[in-house]
Structures are given as C-alpha cells and as structure tokens.
Amino acid sequence: MMVTRRSFIGMLSALGIGTALGSMPAAAPRRPIIDTHVHLFGSGDSGSGCFMSERQRRHWNYPLFLKLLNLREGNMDHDYVAALVGQLRDSSIDRALLFAQDGRYDDSGNFDRTATNAYVPNDYLFEIVARYPNLFIACCSINPKRRDALEELERCAELGSAALKIHPPVQDVDPGLAQFRPFYRRAAELGIVIIVHTGSEHASDVTSHAFSDPARLRTALEEGCTVVAAHTGMGSFLDEHVFLDDMLQNLIALIGRFENLYCDSAVLASAFRWQNLPRILKEPSVIDRLMHGSDWPFPSNAVVFWNRLVPWQVASLASERNLFERDYQLKRALGLPLGVFERAAGLFKRV
Ligand SMILES: [Zn+2]
C-alpha cells in the first residue's frame, strides 16, 4: 500500500492520535461534506464577463493569488476553474457552494463599473455549475441595491441558485435597510439561503465596516430568510479591538432569537486569524450553527496554530498544497466537531 501524506494523517486520526487542543475525532463526518464558501473568480479573458479592476490588480494579494494557483495572465478564466476543479476532486470535500460576485451600484440602482473591484456574473456561475453539476451548488450574487434586484432574484432561482451572496462592505450596501424587505421576503418564499459577509475584510477595498455587523442581518431574518453570517463576524488580530468580540456578541444575540441563522468558518484558519477558532470553540451556541467553509482560494495556515497542534501535524498541513484539504484537515485537527462538517448537507438537501 502506498502511504501518501493524506492517508498518513487519516491513519493517525483513525488511531485516535489527537491534538494538543482536544483530540481529533476518530470518526469522519457523514457524507456529503459540503464546503459552503468557495469563490469563482476570473479576469474575463475567455469572454466570461468577469473582471478585476486595476486597483484589485495592484492589491498586495494579487501576485500571491496568481502564484498560489499557477494562473497565467491571459488564460486566467481557464486556469482558475482548472485549479478549482482539480483541487476539489482531489480533496475530502464532496461538493462546494460556489459564489458569483456582484459589484457596486449607485443610489439609483445602476451598476457602477468604475467602483467595482472584482466582478463575477451570475451567468458565468451557472455555466460553470452546469459543466460540473456533481461538484458545485450555485450561489448567485445580487446586490439588493440594484434596480432589477427582484427580477434577478427570480431569474437566478429559476436557473437553480440555492443561495445568494451579499458582500456589504465590498458592494457598498447596508443589508439592514428596511427598503430591502420585499427582496428578502421573496428570497424566503423561493427558499434561497442568504449568505452575508460579516466581520472585517482585507482582501479588497471596502466602504464601511459598519455594514458587516451581524446585527444588520435582522432585517432578512425578520422576513423569514435562512441566513448565513459568513466568517461568523470575526476579524484578524489587526482589528481585534473592533471586531473580535462586539460583532460576535451581536451574532450570539441573534442566534438566540432566530433558529434559521447560521454562520460559517470561512477564512478563520488563515494566517492573521489564529484567535478566531479558539474563541468560537468557547461558544456552544455558535458551534451549533457553524458550517464548514474554506473561502477557497484564500489559504489556511497551520503554522500560526503551532501551539495547538503537534509538530508532525503542523509540518504535514503546512506542506499540503491542496487548499480544500489543508483547510478541512486543519479545522478538524483544531477540534471543530463533526456537526460543523455535516450541517450544510441538511440545509442544501433539496439540491
Ligand atoms: Zn469569501
């Protein structure tokens, strides 16, 4: 039998050789394991309609992003999907909820291309999901400010979207505004899950971080939506004083009031976020609503958890090139319970 690094980790966990923080559970999560937070990106070089602004290309993370996924300028749309599909197939994850990304809109609801940093049209998302129906579940993106938000919602539901993503600080929209109630009400009727970025954002330009407070989710929840607070309202150590507790407390308060509120673990095991998961693990009400999400392609980092893992785990996870697998194994090793990896299958069972 050939022993790969991945089967070696599996063997050790099956033997119950655990971690410094709790122990890695011997049992594996029930399948299917769904990663609920995965990004589709592109440059538009294949005619996909995607774009990235000059500002986004000057961002410090852009060259890292190209290198990490081996993307060639001029062939980026193709290379990105090839990396995404290749890594997903070669990981323990069965399916991924794949996100489009809408842009910014002006106060009259018209698309503002100049102010938009990264854009992935819903039609391109549906094209990719149709190409790999066993791998992906479609999550469209609709900025509720857009003039045709309701029509686009109907259209995306018709085309099979199971969820819709809103990124308030990047899309310059306050998701808590009362004017969006009809939009949320219709999403609830259509059974579309609303995924909203909460907590801080450093991968792109933002307008107001006040928009990413979980407290702003109340409007959608009151209209009957199932809502996911992406990133569980967490921030990095750089903005700890603002985010790490206030936003989490606001999320906990809403969890107590609404049983259809969930949160995800996306990006919470990355380099500047070593405080996030240990903090969340102390909150049983949050853990009971948490769903596994990687935020692929934003990479997890095992090295910053050196004091919570044994050295062989740090070394093995740090050398894992598959970003889905690294994130999944790291979060299991850090002690996230099985339910976190199983919960999404119940939520998205109709797809
Ligand atoms: Zn994300």
Image (cartoon, helix red, strand yellow):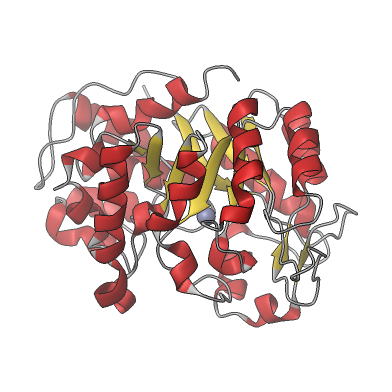
33 or 224, which is in the foreground? 224
* Residue 18 on image: x %, y %: 13, 37
* Residue 246 on image: x %, y %: 26, 65
* Residue 64 on image: x %, y %: 56, 71
Residue ID at (70%, 44%): 82
323 or 209, which is in the foreground? 209
84 or 339, which is in the foreground? 339
Task: Classify residue 316 as left or right of residue 72.
Answer: left
* Residue 294 visible in rendering: no
Residue ID at (75%, 48%): 149
Residue ID at (14%, 50%): 310
Query: From this viewpoint, which residue is outermost toward the front?
Result: 178
Task: Classify residue 275 as left or right of residue 75.
Answer: left
Task: Classify residue 55 as left or right of residue 286.
Answer: right
Q: 129 above or below 234? A: above
* Residue 114 on image: x %, y %: 79, 77
Q: Quadrant of residue 216?
A: bottom left
* Residue 15 visible in rendering: yes
Q: 236 above or below 331? A: below
Count of marks placed on residues? 0
324 or 338, which is in the foreground? 338
Q: 174 above or below 202? A: above
Residue ID at (51%, 51%): 196
Q: 128 above or below 170? A: above
Q: Quadrant of the N terminus?
A: top left
